[in-house]
Amino acid sequence: SDDRDLATRIRVDEEVLGSIEVSGDRDFFTVNIGEAGLFAFEVRAVGNAAVQIFNGRGDPLADSLRSFWVPGEPDELGFYLNWIALQANPQTRYVVQVCSAFPAIGEYTLKVYFTVDDHSDSRDLATPIHVDEEVQGRIELISDMDWFTVVLEEGFWTIELSSIGLGSLELYNDSGRIAGISDSSPTILGFQVAPGDAGNYDVRVTGKTRTGTRMVDEPLQSYTLVVSPGKGPESPDDHGYSIENATEIQVFEEVSGSIEVTGDEDYFAVFLNRSWWKCTLYSPSDISMTLYHADGHIMRNAFPASRSFLEGN
């Protein structure tokens, strides 16, 4: 139906076929969630679909206005995928709208997923864990994330994620700034707590996989997370181990470095003006490179390779 009040009722795990054939057409669906948890709507289409979620009163809750292209297998066609997820309140009616990001998208399929979340998606409600404790978890749905908090003393630490799929680890200090990231396989993050920096650290676990040329969230199934004392390098670390103490370098300066132990990361700080720039990394083995803004948010990623580069304006 094009009318929110006459939205088609659907059930969790039900797959519904629809079609957006003309500009301005839109379809409304409604689903009732009986308990608190995580739910998501997935739309697969031959065109670029937009998805919006409303509560029963018609108030907008979330939207995802552009799909991304998923290449098909050798004998299958590709499709556009749009995915949007929310924490569900118990005994609540939700309405989802599917429309076109362009004049028309043709046929599409809509499916609703729901699960009870094992660890909170909110950093404020992170699960407390202890050093050397093996913690079990699941990334139940795309866009799910699990937060943990742990107290770390001065020294070198290793955070290891064991899972069937490819996972991603992010470590944040008590002020909320990112202190380390690992999305390689195996997923191991080494981190050194400097004198005066001991205290609470937060760990975020997500699922990652490659689709085409970009990283896309994907369910991890089950995983095990362990934070344990790490073995530091036999010689002092050659470059900064966090954004806060990054090694300062200059444009056109060639810098050598070494990843001394599994999980080691080297941080560099450089001033980039408003012109075009390019950063090239050479290594005998595959390593990754990430560009952060000074405030800690990720601006660009380069996938692990023996020769990788980042560029921009």
Image (cartoon, grey):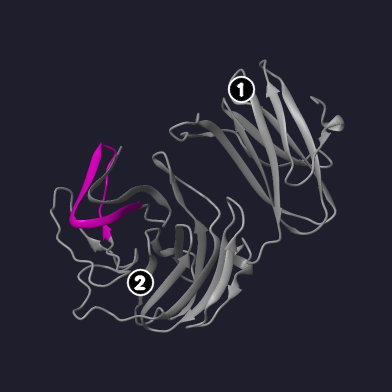
Residue that extends furthest to the front in the rendered view of this protein: 75
Residue 246: % across, % down: 28, 64
Residue assigned mark 2? 190
- The quarter holding residue 180 reads bottom left
Is 290 inside the magenta-drawn segment?
Answer: yes
- The quarter holding residue 28 reads top right
Number of residues whose C-alpha sits closer than 10 Å to that of mark 1, classed few (under 14), some (14–19) or many (20 or more): many
Callout 1 secondary element: loop
**Which of the numbered marks, if any, corresponds to residue 295?**
none
Callout 2 secondary element: strand
Magenta residue span: 268-291
Kind of residue sitting beneath label 1: Ile
Kind of residue sitting beneath label 2: Gly
Residue 300: % across, % down: 36, 46
Residue beneath the point at 34% across and 63% down:
243
Q: CA distance from mark 2 to mark 1?
A: 46 Å
Q: Nearer the viewer, residue 115 or 124?
A: 115
Quarter of the image for the C terminus: give it.
top left
Residue 270: % across, % down: 25, 53
Count of labels in the image: 2
| In the image: residue 103, left or right of residue 253 | right
Q: Nearer the viewer, residue 260 or 166?
A: 166
Assign the magenta stretch its main secondary structure: strand
Number of residues whose C-alpha sits closer than 10 Å to that of mark 2, classed few (under 14), some (14–19) or many (20 or more): many
Residue assigned mark 1? 105
| In the image: residue 282, left or right of residue 218 | left
- Residues at discs 2 and 1 in contact (Cβ within 8 Å): no
Placement of 17 over or under 293, stated as above or below: above
Q: Between disc 2 and disc 1, whose residue precedes? A: 1
| In the image: residue 215, left or right of residue 88 | left
